[in-house]
Image (tube, helix red, strand yellow):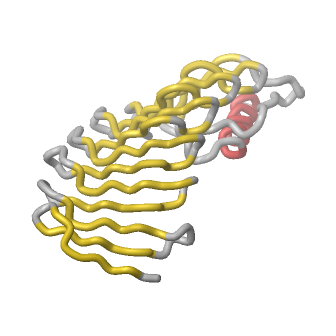
Amino acid sequence: MKNKAIFLILSLLLTCSITNVYGQEEAVLYQLDGKPLNGKIQRYNDYDIKVEDVTYEEGMRTGIRKTYYRNGVLFSEGKYVLGKLEGEYKTYYENGKTKGIYAYQEGVKEGISKFYDDDGKLEYETLFRNDKKELHHRFYDNGKIKYTTTYVEGIINQEDKFTTREKLDQRSYYKNGKVIKIDYYENGKFSHGLNFD
């Protein structure tokens, strides 16, 4: 009983203090004896359903980490190298369909991340460079672009909105996020614009 209590306390401390929303490692984990944590860890909830599979080497996540919903269905999986996400990090809906695919390189978002609705249709995709947004597309159910947003150094620069067939308007922004101008389109062609200087 004493060993189980120590294990539960240790598990709680290990999981609460070192991860952020995206599952990135923020510290090296140590055992109670002061040595870096090594080996495969499987965490279970109060109902003995597995909620996490992870391997540690020298206190850092290594290899494939999987997390699960409270009912045991796979929630996420991603590969870690030296405690940092590397390659694809996937999240899933409880129905098993893909929810999101994030691209990571040395622990930062790098490349295209895609997000799907629970029916498997692509909702939006975002291009990241060095953990900052560069380009974002949101889609209609038919797969056509609903709007496109471009960013400079992670700050919104321009947004283009479309109907299912043609461009509606284009907004340009200052670095502080205020609108510089809006150009309106009719039948896909420029109609008129508003400047906010």
Question: In this picture, is 83 found above or below 70?
Answer: above
- Asked if residue 50 can be seen in this view, the reply is no
Q: Residue at x 33, y 80 (%)?
A: 194
Q: Residue at x 26, y 42 (%)?
A: 122
Question: In this picture, is 82 found above or below 141?
Answer: above
Residue furthest to the right in view is: 34
Direction from residue 27 to residue 100 in the image, left or right? left
Q: Position of residue 71 (x, y in %)?
A: 39, 37
Direction from residue 152 to residue 167 in the image, left or right? left
104 and 74: which one is in front? 104
Q: Position of residue 99 (x, y in %)?
A: 35, 40
Question: In this picture, is 190 found above or below 64?
Answer: below
Query: Quarter of the image containing the N terminus?
Result: top right
Q: Position of residue 96 (x, y in %)?
A: 30, 32
Q: Residue at x 56, y 43 (%)?
A: 22
Instruction: Please state the total of marks drawn on the protein image.
Output: 0
The image quarter in which residue 160 lies: bottom left
- Asked if residue 21 can be seen in this view, the reply is yes
The image quarter in which residue 16 lies: top right
Question: In this picture, is 192 found above or below 48?
Answer: below
Q: Position of residue 6 (x, y in %)?
A: 75, 34
Q: Residue at x 62, y 46 (%)?
A: 20
